[in-house]
Image (cartoon, coloured by chain):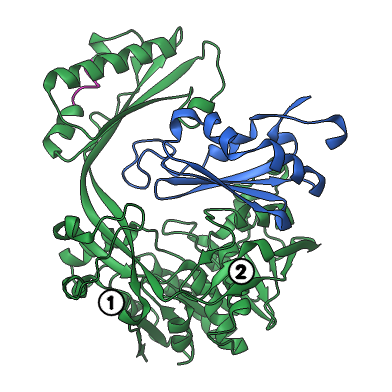
Amino acid sequence: MIRIANGQGFWGDWLEAPVRLVEQGPIDYLCLDYLAEITMSILQKQKLENPELGYARDFPPLIGRIAKQIRERGVTVIANAGGVNPAACAREVKRLAPELKVAVVHGDNLYPQLDDLLARGLPLKNMDTGEGLATVRDRVLSANAYIGAFPLVEALATGAQVIIAGRCTDTALTLAPMVHRFGWREDDYHLLAAGTIAGHIIECGAQATGGNCQVDWQTIPDFANIGYPIVEAEPDGSFTVTKHPGTGGRVSADVVKEQLLYELGDPRNYITPDCVADFTTIQLKDSGPNRVRVSGIEGRPRTPYLKVSLSYHWGYKAIGSLVYSWPEAYGKARLAERIVRERLSQLGLTFDEIWSEILGFNACHGPAALPFPDVPEVQLRIGVRGASKKDVDRFTRELIPLVLSGPPTATGFGDGRPPVREVVAYWPALVPREEIRTSVEVFQ
Amino acid sequence: MKIHLSEIAHARSGDKGDMANIGVIAFAPKHFPVLVREVTAERVKSYFGNFVKGEVERFELPNLGALNFLLHESLGGGGTLSLRIDAQGKTMSAALLRMEIEVAEGEL
């Protein structure tokens, strides 16, 4: 049995979680997931400004902080912290923790060879819209293939204590140590599916241990000290989800079921670079306090393609707000919205969308929101999105004047004009698997 | 009689681009057939009204006593494009749990 923990569900997750995972009990592998779909484009921009950046900057200081425990407790760290510059990330880790052996997985970054791929007739069509990439080629900011567990396994085989990847799948971080330690092969697709689903359960950190859970949330103990998830994996593909004793949160069948359904598409076809996992084969049950046993998982062979995540400059957006108080807060907010829309129209500005919603009324649930009485206050939140930065900027001047010139009791404008933000959009595509060649570089 | 879905199920929602997914999970195995009968893709689409511009697909996971709904074009463009406060659909699960369903007394 091996213990695999996840200490970071996204870049920005709780900084103490991975430290506590290595301090508060035994684990063999510590997985850290840093990359959301849009993160790569931010990192690409940082690298263009400074060739030594472009990775998750939280990661090297974390490794510096837990280097002693990694060494003494024999923990191996596997992270997709490398972003678009895993080698620079590794150099910074070595600077802060020179005694650790670090391995980097290269090969996911397709940005440098994008024109070559297009020239050879790969259209990199948008999986959602079917459009060819040529329409946005000059605005592409990043292009990375999702790599699976096997390139990470190659890195684990070097005996490195810290494995740094770029754009690998979240589930590969958890599956890789199982493949490495149990000797699973590329055609063991039931086993690969089991490890993939274990990865899906823990990839969002504390969402598998009671965070964001709707079942009896009022009684979930000690959120402040919530334990992050640990998978106790067996060579036959079965596993137990748990957390360190004495930590907060809850691991139960209900909690794990909610996480299984999180961001799930077709449950029979959960496609990864390693296999196609079938969520309708999962058997799970409570097997002790804060322990859930998972077994029976089946899968099918991997597809001939890898998914590529591209990002491109779309345009600009800005969102501002005003607060209106009782009485008739809602009516005042709606009147203010009509005034803003009329003024934007008079100015002849062009937007792709003008969206308004009223916090305290229907912003989250829209048409499904409850009818409500005359509430103490609401927040009018109004935003625009468009290709013209100038038009979006002009919009940002149209809210604050209403404090003096619109319906009464407006407040909440203390932050001034809302900022204009660049919109970087996401473009998912497929490439034949053989286009991606990965390699491992060891930093002694 | 009419009850809120929250009396027999819990849920979690999330996003994939401009598509929200809502997983609805029966508290007990005997409630799963009620979910299958009452919480149809058509009902979910009309419940969220103009929030859902595309289709609603439904998948069954009897092994978990769960249904998974995919709400296409339901997040105002999704990801970074969306102007909505809940651009990732994280609260849509709670909204769905307030939906009223029809059950016989013996089904509870």
Badge 1 and badge 2 in a common chain? yes
Q: If you read the primary sequence from the N terminus, does the residue marked by circle 1 or circle 2 appear first?
A: 1
- Look at discs 1 and 2 and give the one toward the viewer: 2
**Horizontal side of residue A428 vs B23, given as left or right:** left
Rendered position, A17 above or below A175: above
The percent position of residue A336, horizontal first and vertical second, equals: 31, 14
Which disc number belongs to residue B108? none
Q: Is residue A136 magenta?
A: no
Mark 1 nearby-residue class (10 Å; few <14, some 14–19, many ≥20): some
Residue lying at the far right of the rendered structure = B106
The percent position of residue A48, horizontal first and vertical second, equals: 17, 65
Q: Alpha carbon of mark 1 to alpha carbon of mark 2: how far?
A: 30 Å
Rendered position, A35 above or below B92: below
- Give the colour chain A carries in the figure: green
Amino acid marked by disc 2: Ala
When asked about the image quadrant of residue A264, the answer is bottom right
Amino acid marked by disc 1: Ala
Give the residue displayed 53% in from the left and 59% down from the top: A204
Chain letter tied to blue = B
When asked about the image quadrant of residue B30, the answer is top right
Indicate the quadrant containing the C terminus of chain A: top left, top right, bottom left or bottom right: bottom left
Which disc number belongs to residue A88? 1
Give the residue displayed 14% in from the left and 17% down from the top: A346
Which stretch did the figure color magenta?
A396-401
Give the residue displayed 40% in from the left and 85% down from the top: A102
Query: Judging from the image, what secondary structure is the residue with disc 2 in?
Result: helix
Q: Which residue is mark 2?
A: A198
Indicate the quadrant containing the N terminus of chain A: top left, top right, bottom left or bottom right: bottom right
Give the residue displayed 36% in from the left and 90% down from the top: A442
**Horizontal side of residue A336 vs A111, given as left or right:** right
